[in-house]
Amino acid sequence: MTSETAGGDRFGAFGGRYVPETLIPALDELEAAFAAAWADPAFHVELDSALRHYVGRPSPLSDAPRLSALVGAPVWLKREDLNHTGAHKINNAMAQAILAKRMGKQRIIAETGAGQHGVATATVCARLGLSCVVYMGEEDMRRQSLNVFRMKLLGATVVPVTTGTRTLKDATSEAIREWVTTCDHSHYIIGSVVGPAPYPRMVRDFQAVIGREAREQMLERAGRLPKSVVACVGGGSNAMGIFHAFVPDAGVELIGVEAAGHGLDSDQHSASLTKGRPGVLHGALSYLLQDAHGQVHPAHSISAGLDYPGVGPEHAFFKDSGRASYVSVTDDVALAAFSRFSQLEGIIPALETAHAAAWIMANAGRWAADEPVLLCVSGRGDKDVAQVAEMGIFTA
């Protein structure tokens, strides 16, 4: 099963390029550079070496005995939280930074929500000697102050975004605006499988290492492929990264878990696939939250990394084609899972990951005792502890 049309710029009806004409030459340059790098063994040698010896790949596949006992089926954890910087984001950031150097670009622009992509980008820029500017919404800077400090410590300039909801959507908009005027010497590292072509395909290919490793590890450790692969979905890069290797396996169900915020009927959620409709955001056609007039509706999630009103176009294709199913979890349920997962397995997950773990816990008994469930632990929860503590919630 393939989701790409000729040229690779669309996934069924979704994707494409809806950008100012001034950006088309930059996107053409990027697409040509990516194609050349992907076909060049030297690029893969450099990237694989960086992922292995700097990032720490392959990330482990951990069993989860106490969670498995609760669920009634073996649950396996793909541990992206154990990567350098604590999340899956560095896989893509490292690859795009190496690509930028090949293109002769010495300045990097990025956007960030939870701060994990910003930290990953600042990290690889420090490693490769590139200058780095990260746009981040003021509200997210408040929620993720630790990651703001980390980015600055790594040498990045963090630009507060004060417009709109002051979250990821607005940070992305500001980053794109700057790139329009600086694309001759700057490269924009988009952090998820969103944006105009070739970004959704390129970021997916850079994150697909997660699924390739997990597929091999499941066959080795569990002796079979998983019955279900479960991952949280905001923009959707960790989910697409782990899904991609399993797409041809018809017997493996793919489950994406969105943020239901205060509830799907509350108008305060981030469930673009569950409650949105097709529209254009940040250069691509996909599902997004819209008001009655077709304007982008503000998203809400307790998790800054899921607080985005759109989703990657390949996820939109998977929804319409039925290859993946998309569900949602509220803030309160995710918070409870944040605590319970920590106490069951000794792993403090990111609030994003807690949404996916919560859905698995809520569906205990859904799987037979011999049907493995694979959960992508997209990141660690250090960044979220202060936020949860400030809420005054007793999680013990």
Image (cartoon, rainbow, N blue to C red):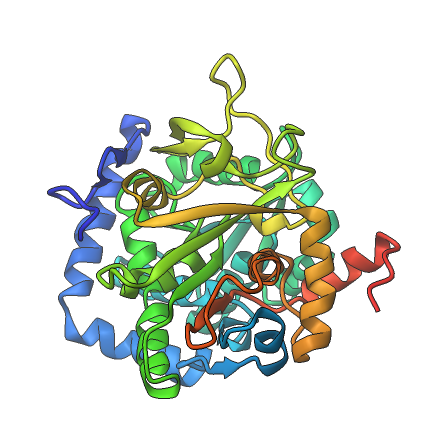
Which residue is farthest left?
6
The image quadrant of residue 334 is bottom right
> Residue at horizontal 45%, vertical 70%?
368
Along the viewing direction, whichever of 198 and 327 lies nearer the viewer? 327
Question: Is 208 above or below relative to 288?
Answer: below
Q: Residue at x 66, y 60 (%)?
A: 147
Q: Is residue 341 left or right of residue 254?
A: right
Q: Nearer the viewer, residue 45 or 243?
A: 243
Q: Position of residue 58 (x, y in %)?
A: 40, 81
Position of residue 345 measured from the top left corner of the image (x, y, whole percent)? 65, 78
Number of marks in the rendered image: 0
Residue at position x 82%, y 64% from top? 395
Residue 153: x %, y % from top left: 65, 66
Which of 48 and 226 lies nearest the eye of the viewer? Answer: 226
- As displayed, is residue 233 above or below residue 350? above
Residue 108 shows in this picture: no
- Image quadrant assignment for residue 40: bottom left
The answer to whether residue 44 is visible is yes
Work out which residue is located at the far top of the displayed protein and give it. 293
Residue found 32% across the figure and 79% down from its top = 224
